[in-house]
């Protein structure tokens, strides 16, 4: 973990004029990732509670079918959250080991705007585009 804890001023936003992935920027993204993780965990728990609290054998066939469809959607959402939580944990590991904010493929800066939009990004835009082209070619 980070030994020299940084305290951010209220409303702090990373700026291009600062040292890229300096202590303040790393702390900003650490907090952003923790907050996102907490929100997803809370929503996941609500999903579990909703599914547990449901009475299964009430209603006619159409109502049961609707409920099953809703449950299926909730389970897919929960699976998506599980995958996101895994990516968030890996991003937090990268914050701690100092590799956060740098492209896994090229080692170049991912960029502040991209990380603010997608804090779990592991590729710079060029590498991401190459990856997407390869995925399209394989399908």
Image: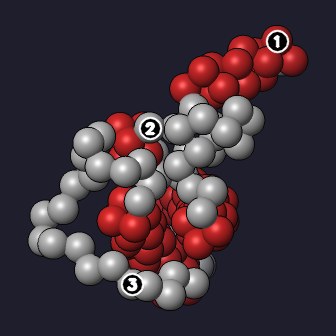
**Separation of marks 1 and 3 at Cα, in angstroms:** 45 Å
Residue 137, label in figure: 1
- Vertical placement of residue 45 versus 93, above or below: below
**Above or below 35: residue 101:** above
Badge 1 element:
helix
- Confirm or deny contact between disc 2 and disc 3 (CB under 8 A): no
First reached walking from the N terminus: tag 1 or tag 3? 3
Give the residue number, with chain letter if any, for mark 2: 111
Q: Residue at x 63, y 57 (%)?
A: 99
**Residue 4 at x, y percent in the picture:** 43, 85
Left or right of residue 9, residue 116 in this image = right
Image height of 40 relative to 115, above or below: below
Mark 3 is surrounded, within 10 Å at the Cα level, by few (under 14), some (14 to 19) or many (20 or more) other residues, namely few
Report whether residue 2 is seen: yes
Q: Residue furthest left?
A: 10
In the image, which is nearer the foreground, mark 2 or mark 3?
3
Instruction: Say which mark, if any, is on residue 12.
Output: none
CA distance separating discs 1 and 2: 27 Å
| Label 3 residue SS | loop
Q: Residues within 10 Å of mark 2 (few under 14, many from 20)?
A: some
Q: Residue at x 38, y 42 (%)?
A: 112
Residue 5 is marked as 3
Mark 1 surroundings: few (<14), some (14-19) or many (≥20) residues within 10 A: few
Residue at mark 2 to residue at mark 3: CA–CA distance? 23 Å
């Amino acid at each position: 973990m980070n030994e020299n804890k940084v305290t951010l001023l209220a409303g702090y936003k990373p700026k291009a004029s600062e040292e890229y992935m300096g202590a303040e920027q790393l702390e900003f993204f650490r907090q952003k990732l923790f907050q996102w993780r907490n929100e997803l965990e809370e929503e996941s728990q609500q999903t579990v509670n909703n599914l547990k609290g449901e009475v299964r054998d009430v209603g006619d066939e159409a109502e049961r079918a609707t409920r099953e469809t809703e449950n299926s959607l909730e389970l897919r959402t929960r699976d998506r959250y599980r995958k996101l939580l895994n990516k968030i944990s890996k991003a937090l590991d990268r914050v701690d080991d100092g590799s956060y904010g740098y492209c896994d493929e090229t080692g170049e800066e991912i960029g502040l705007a991209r990380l603010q939009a997608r804090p779990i990004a592991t590729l710079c835009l060029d590498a991401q585009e190459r990856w997407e082209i390869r995925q399209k070619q394989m399908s």
